[in-house]
Image (cartoon, helix red, strand yellow):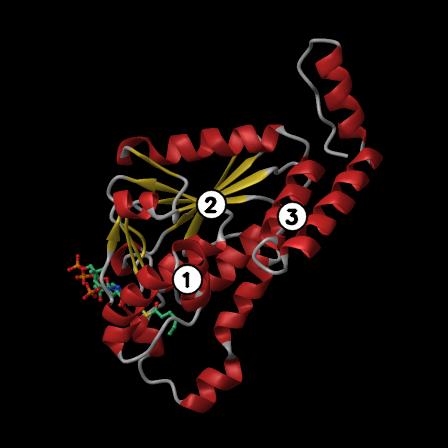
Amino acid sequence: MTYETILTETRGRVLLVTLNRPKALNAINAQLTAEVIAAATAADADPGIGCIVLTGSERAFAAGADIKEMQHLTYAEVYGRDRFSDWDRFNAVRTPIIAAVAGYALGGGCELAMMCDFILAADTAQFGQPEIKLGVMPGMGGSQRLTRFVGKAKAMEMCLTGRMMDAGEAERCGLVSRIVPAADLVEEAVKTATTIASMSKPAAMMTKEAVNRAYETTLSEGLRHERRVFHAMFATEDQKEGMAAFVEKRPATFSHR
Ligand code: HXC
């Protein structure tokens, strides 16, 4: 498929998706939304892809939803179209997704990064939910995910003042998994994705599902879910291969089944 607002590149079992609206700092318009979701869902259906990396440019991961596209919408149009609910299909992707963030991740950009399974940040990354300055509020999950990830105090301050958080603060409060030099960001993200993609795909998908369950349910339900999924893994070829390889002191070769 040909895309106009993103670039896609397959590197082994990794799909690298680069947001590519440089003149608008990768602002998320309807077309970019549709293309990111199409690329991610296609990769999810492809057994040859084991991990997705989503990145932007050095200057901006994404500076938010496209303000110029939204500016004149009426309540009836926003409510009727409910465009941000399209991201439910991105959130249903079962293949692990890494956000590699350099520069601005603001508003919908911060929210898109948080929809990924974890965020690798360049030392230049800046996170923020500045919607309040536009007379609105986060609409792609920011008030919910940011609060779960960094706690109420920081989320409330960021959403109410619009102040940005730099990479160091984001790492300290658990928003990002780690910080890498900006020049190494994409390579490091692809390297990490390659590690994930080399694992059993069913095991990676079930692990993603179980970790995400921790945000959706009680501890006892989450633990029950984890145990049931763990039991189910003994029906996979990869469990037999992974454990046999350990016992035989050789690298595992997973069939992703
Ligand atoms: C549309 C945007 C944009 C956006 C930047 N641009 N952000 N266009 N939507 N979210 C455009 C600018 O209009 C400009 O286009 C070009 O990108 C470069 O931006 P500058 O402002 O000239 O760059 P700079 O001075 O370096 O400032 C960078 C910036 C600033 C701090 C990131 O652009 C900024 O504050 N952007 C808006 C951030 C924001 O409010 N995001 C939240 C959006 S609302 P021209 O044509 O002038 O060169 C949102 C809602 C989520 O995300 C869902 C709930 C509603």
What residue appears at the point 65 percent right and 48 percent down from the top-left corner?
210
Viewer-proximal residue, 215 or 14? 215
Element assignment for label 1: helix
Disc 3 residue type? Ala
- Judged left or right of residue 21, residue 91 is right
Residue 27, visible in the rendered structure? no
Q: Position of residue 184 (x, y in %)?
A: 32, 30
To which quarter of the image does residue 250 belong? top right
Q: Position of residue 72 (x, y in %)?
A: 32, 85
Disc 1 residue type? Thr
Element assignment for label 2: strand
Disc 2 residue type? Phe
**Comes first in the chain, label 1 or label 3:** 1
**Residue hosting label 1:** 147
Q: Where is residue 40 in the image (x, y as percent from the top left)?
A: 56, 51
What residue appears at the point 27 percent right and 36 percent down from the top-left corner?
182
Q: How far apart are marks 2 and 3 (CA)?
A: 14 Å
**Residue hosting label 3:** 210
**Residue hosting label 2:** 118
Residue neighbourhood size for the residue with mark 3, other residues' Cα within 10 Å, grouped as few (<14), some (14–19), many (≥20):
some
Q: Where is residue 240 in the image (x, y as percent from the top left)?
A: 80, 25
Q: Quadrant of the C terminus?
A: top right
Viewer-proximal residue, 50 or 241? 241
Residue 49, visible in the rendered structure? yes
Label 2 or label 3, whichever lies nearer to me, is 3
Q: Distance between the residues labelled 1 and 3?
A: 20 Å
